[in-house]
Structures are given as C-alpha cells and as structure tokens.
Image (cartoon, rainbow, N blue to C red):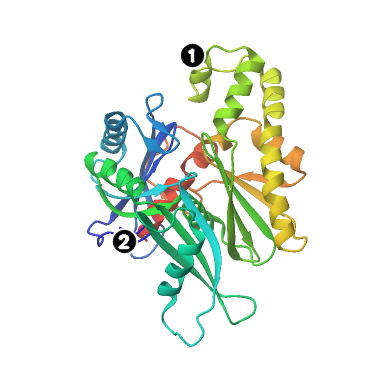
C-alpha cells in the first residue's frame, strides 16, 4: 500500500476528506461535479479523548474509531469513500535530484535505490511514494519529492478509517494536502517565496513554494498545545477553562491580557519559523519569504496571525479553504467560514483529490 497511491477506484460522486489529528478529527464532505465548483456538503470537528493519539500513534483505537464514525454519520451520512492523511516525525520526506542517464522511464527504480541511502531505517517495512517535480535547473537531472512512512503507521490509520465504516481510497501526507488546498483556492504565484505554515496540535510543518513550484517542507517542534500551555500559565486558567476556550465555549473576559499572552506565546513560533526560513535563505542563496499563509488549529487562535506578522515582519494571512467551493445551504450553521477555515485546510485539500 503506497502512501499516495489510489487504493481503489472512485465509485461515488461525493468524497470525505478525513484529517485525524492529535487533538481532534476533522471531516469535509465534497461533491465533485464534472464541471463547475465542487460543492461543500458538510463539515465538522470532533474532539478526541485525552492521549488517544500520542506522537501520531493511535493508542485509544475505540475512542478514535467512535469519533470518526459519529462525526461522519453527522456531517456526511451518505458518503463512505474517504481520503486521509499522515504527518509527524514518523513521516520522512526529502527532495532528491535523480540522474537517469540513458535509462528512460526508470525513474521509480532510481528513486527506490536513492531511498535506500536516504531513509535512516532503510526501506524494509516502509511504504514509499514520490512526486516528480520535473527537470532540475541543470536540465540533466529530475527533481523528485520522496515520501516514506512506516507501513504499520499507514495501516494503522487505514484500518481505523475502515473500522469506522469508511472506505479509504487513498492516503496522502499533510503538506501535500495543504498545498492542494492552497493551489485550488488561491492559485500559485509565479514569483516569490511563499510559506504555508500548518500549526497542528504539537507540530508545525511549513511548505515552501518558490517561483510557482513546490520546493520543500520543514517541521518545527512547536504547535498549538505549547501556545495554549503558555496562555494557561500566563492567565492562570484551570484546565477545564482552557479546554472550553479552545473549543469556543468560554469567552475570554480580559481580552487585552489574552492578546498579550498570545503575543508572548508567539515568540516560540517565531523562533521555529526563523530556523526554517534561515534554511531556505541558505539553500537559495538569500531568497526571503514574501508571505506566510497559516492553517491548522493553531491558526484559529485569536491574535496569533497578527503576532506572527509583527514578530517576523512578514505579511501573514490565515487560509480560507472554502473560497473556491460552493457551500450547501446551512452548511456553516452560523459559523464564520474565514474564522474556522484554517482548521479545515487539510481536510479540504484531501477531499479535493477526488476531483
């Protein structure tokens, strides 16, 4: 079972994008017509039991299965085919330049040979896929993105979705889903350096687009959990109060104090971004990031986009993955699409693979 390969052919006109995160599960249900805009039929989020997923390993299988099953029945009762995603430190990615010489049509074979050298644990027990970017700048080699994950991790998520009553037809990785949602809704600028920063619960991954092309992805070990922990300590909140604030059930009374706490907490995010941005500057001989697009649960934290923009001195915009979709009546249930949008970026990007 390859990571990005289609597992089986499409049978339905609607598709579920299933994003199983550390803190919650997100589902987007799209109907993809032969022509015209994809139609947003349903969306929802369900909080997972504490420690149900630890470092991307599913520990509480029944809890995760119930969350996926109940949410799917609520927001996508007539859909079963799903595309899901993998992420985290157990997913290995690398940018390769492959020299084929006279061996035309043997790119896959060359990538597998290179993967043996690049993957620290070797290729035994590992699911491998790659994305061909095209010719390298020298015109002689091929640019390739290598993606690999432990087969047991791939199968863990696959069988969790299947046991929840869904029919997984493909498995993607987070940064490709983020890229897909961005490309569909915003288009890819032909010039400049764009950073797509997906702030997950425990990890932030940053996809770089340079002059209209996917370039690379970098992980930062700071996520929404660290930001919320700082806010809890700064404002002396109880655990229950913090949980209610995260899911929007408890309004913050002192907004100035909350804003100050978020700006202070954003310093760790900024330091992580600095490391990733410095890497890009080094490998591109001085290219700097022109704009940051935020996604993930962390991007929905009030004042965080403004804080990151101020600290990095770079324009920041939360991504809205619904811009190019045609929403069904009442699908947002009074919620602001722009506000909740960053949370559903990857789920939308997954569902759009069904186009």
Residue at image mark 1: 240
Q: Which mark is residue 6?
A: 2
What residue lies at 59% left-to-right and 31% top-to-bottom?
Answer: 301
In the image, is 17 to the left or to the right of 316? Answer: left
Q: Is residue 17 left or right of residue 7?
A: right
**Which circle marks residue 25 in the picture?**
none
Residue at image location 44% in from the left, 34% down from the top: 22
Pinpoint residue 242: horizontal percent, then vertical percent.
53, 18
* Residue 155, placed above or below residue 248: below
Q: Dot 2 lies on which element?
A: loop
Where residue 27 sits: x, y (%)?
Answer: 37, 41
Residue 77 against residue 259 in the figure, above or below: below
Residue 73: percent from left, percent from top: 25, 36
Which quadrant of the figure has residue 302? top right
Which residue appears at 42% of the width and 68% of the height?
112
Left or right: 312 as drawn, with respect to 252: right
> Regarding mark 1 in the picture, which secondary structure is present there?
helix
* 29 is higher (above) or lower (below) than 280: above
């Amino acid at each position: 079972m390859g990571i990005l390969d289609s597992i089986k052919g499409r049978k339905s006109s609607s598709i579920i994008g299933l994003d199983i995160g550390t803190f919650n599960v997100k589902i987007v249900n799209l109907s993809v017509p032969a022509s015209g805009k994809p139609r947003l039929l349903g969306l929802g989020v369900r909080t997972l039991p504490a420690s149900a997923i630890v470092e991307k390993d599913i520990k509480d299988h029944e809890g995760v299965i119930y969350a996926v099953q109940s949410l799917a029945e609520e927001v996508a009762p007539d859909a079963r085919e799903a595309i899901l995603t993998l992420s985290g430190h157990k997913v290995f990615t690398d940018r390769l330049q492959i020299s084929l010489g006279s061996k035309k049509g043997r790119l896959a074979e060359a990538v597998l040979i290179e993967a043996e050298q690049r993957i620290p644990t070797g290729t035994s027990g590992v699911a491998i896929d790659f994305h061909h970017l095209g010719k390298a700048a020298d015109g002689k080699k091929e640019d390739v993105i290598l993606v690999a994950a432990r087969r047991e991790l791939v199968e863990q998520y696959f069988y969790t979705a299947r046991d929840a009553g869904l029919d997984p037809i493909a498995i993607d990785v987070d940064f490709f889903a983020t890229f897909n949602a961005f490309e569909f809704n915003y288009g890819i600028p032909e010039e400049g350096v764009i950073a797509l920063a997906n702030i997950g619960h425990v990890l932030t991954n940053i996809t770089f687009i340079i002059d209209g092309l996917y370039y690379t992805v970098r992980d930062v070990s700071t996520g929404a959990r660290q930001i919320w922990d700082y806010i809890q300590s700064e404002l002396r909140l109880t655990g229950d109060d913090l949980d209610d604030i995260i899911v929007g059930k408890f309004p913050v009374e002192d907004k100035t104090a909350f804003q100050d706490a978020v700006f202070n907490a954003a310093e760790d995010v900024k330091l992580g971004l600095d490391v990733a941005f410095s890497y890009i500057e080094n490998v591109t001989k001085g290219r700097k990031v022109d704009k940051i697009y935020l996604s993930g649960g962390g991007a929905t934290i009030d004042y965080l986009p403004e804080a990151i923009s101020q600290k990095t001195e770079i324009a920041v915009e939360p991504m809205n993955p619904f811009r190019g979709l045609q929403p069904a009546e009442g699908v947002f249930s009074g919620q602001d699409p722009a506000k909740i949008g960053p949370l559903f970026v990857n789920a939308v990007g997954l569902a759009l693979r069904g186009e």
